[in-house]
Image (spheres, coloured by chain):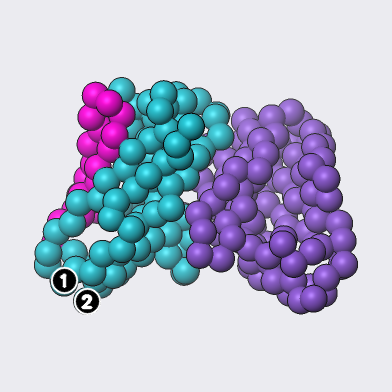
Chain colours: A purple, B cyan
Amino acid sequence: GQQVMQIPQYQHVQEGEDFTTYCNSSTTLSNIQWYKQRPGGHPVFLIQLVKSGEVKKQKRLTFQFGEAKKNSSLHITATQTTDVGTYFCAGPVNSTLTFGKGTMLLVSP
Amino acid sequence: KAGVTQTPRYLIKTRGQQVTLSCSPISGHRSVSWYQQTPGQGLQFLFEYFSETQRNKGNFPGRFSGRQFSNSRSEMNVSTLELGDSALYLCASKPGQGPYEQYFGPGTRLTVT
């Protein structure tokens, strides 16, 4: 069964509002990756986190890896319409990169 | 550097038929993974190939198979197609085994009628 869970499944925000998606694993992960898939597109790698408690920033995006390496989050500050898409987390489970089901973000201008 | 390419981009097949999808990884990448993406199930791992050997396999029936050639190009085959096989099939490549970022191709949209 699905061992990497993401919430929420879907979020609709007004442009300028913040957005957060959460990723939880039933097992400790050696690393976690985040991908973004635009509508009609394919997943594109955003970042990889490896260390316990790690925090990385990419402009308005902040990624965190939990202390126990079982959870992660992606926070977008002041969303823009270009942030629209589905955000996936993925971690190695039983030697395979297992993806969460993703959080679909819709941003209204 | 050219990205991952997949052919064909769109395909319509009938139940019971078989299909072969092709993936050319980024030059120098030796690991190729295949995923099935559907609205209900998200991205499901099919298999990973490295140096022409299948290294990992997801929880899919034996109708799904694949192979990798010496130039790292990969194909996946689905025999005896079922309606539920309708999906976007994505190929991803990375330089080697290990926790590298994956580069996805545009996918093949398969519709089974």
Quarter assignment of residue B92: top left
Quarter assignment of residue A22: bottom right
Residue hosting label 1: B15
Judged left or right of residue B24, residue A22 is right
Q: Callout 1: residue from which chain?
A: B
Residue B53 shows in this picture: no
Name the image quarter holding the C terminus of chain A: bottom right
Looking at the image, residue A2 lies above or below residue B87: above
Part of the protein shown in magenta: B61-80
Nearest the viewer among A65 and B37 is: B37
Looking at the image, residue B88 lies above or below residue B95: below
Label 1 sits on what residue type?
Arg
Q: Residue at x 82, y 40 (%)?
A: A57
Tell whether position B67 is magenta.
yes
Judged left or right of residue B99, residue B62 is left
Q: Residue at x 23, y 36 (%)?
A: B67
Q: Callout 2: residue from which chain?
A: B
Label 2 sits on what residue type?
Thr
Callout 2 crowding tier (Cα within 10 Å): few <14, some 14–19, many ≥20: some
Q: Residue at x 70, y 34 (%)?
A: A49
Q: Residue at x 50, y 40 (%)?
A: B103
Tell whether position B14 is magenta.
no
Quarter assignment of residue B66: top left
Name the element at disc 2: loop
Name the element at disc 1: loop
Residue B21 shows in this picture: yes
- Residue A82, how many percent across, how many down? 72, 62
Mark 2 near mark 1, Cβ–Cβ under 8 Å? yes
* Mark number displayed over residue B113: 2
